[in-house]
Amino acid sequence: MSCVDLGDLPSRLTGATLAVAFQKIWQFGAEGATVQMRIPHPRHDSFLIDLGYVQALLPETFMQLDQRHSKTGLANQLRVNFEVVETAFVLDPYWQAAVNEGQASVEDIQLISRQASNVIEWIDIQLRVNKSLWVEAGATKLDPEMRRQLQEQLQGHVDRGDEQAANVIRKFLENASVGEKVTK
């Protein structure tokens, strides 16, 4: 998989379900694959009035899936590594018109959006699957169950002919345990 567009789905999933979804995307995504989404800003009526939205999310939420920037350790816990490569804010039509007509500057909007609701309507976020960094940051010791799961995943990738994913797992296993035989 090289690209997936989630739309507003992340805001419609509970935390545990969203975590599993990102684990699966990371597992089946190729190195460098992109994940795009357009989520509602949690201080906009678009988010507040839609009963389907169950979770408020911000770009900083997705930084927790990046091993280099995760303040919570979530990326390591989930064994994923996504890099936030782009974030764009889509203004409410009222505020977009004010910017277009020169009545408000970008700096004004940034200040107002921290203090008021209904300024930013949507947040466009693009993530990139970063498996090479995960491999470089691999653990030095794996518990037997994790090793077994990784070897099963490796064999599945080999069986499907997905050499790129198989090589990532091979390299991780090699880094995690120098001297042990790895499935070729």
Image (cartoon, rainbow, N blue to C red):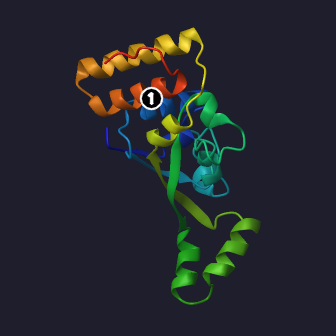
Is 37 in front, or is 96? 37
Query: In the visual, does 136 lie left or right of 71?
Result: left
Is 163 in front, or is 64? 163
The picture quadrant where one finds residue 117 is bottom right
* Amino acid, disc 1: Lys
Task: Name the residue rendered at 58%, 44% in the picture.
Answer: 66
Position in image of residue 172 (x %, y %): 47, 28
- Neighbourhood count class around disc 1 (C-alpha, 10 Å): few under 14, some 14–19, many 20 upward: few
The picture quadrant where one finds residue 25 is top left
Q: Assign the C terminus to one quadrant of the image.
A: top left
User: SS of the residue at dot 1?
Assistant: helix
Is 38 in front, or is 155? 155
Q: Which residue is mark 1?
A: 24
Task: Name the residue rendered at 61%, 56% in the picture.
Answer: 41
Query: Vertically, is 63 above or below 158?
Result: below
Position in image of residue 137 (x %, y %): 57, 37
Outermost residue toward the front in this view: 179
Whether residue 100 is visible, yes or no, is yes
Q: Give the total of numbered labels.
A: 1
Task: Name the residue rendered at 59%, 75% in the picture.
Answer: 95
Whether residue 49 is visible, yes or no, is no
Position in image of residue 85 (x %, y %): 49, 57
The picture quadrant where one finds residue 54 is top right
Query: Vertically, is 84 above or below 138?
Result: below
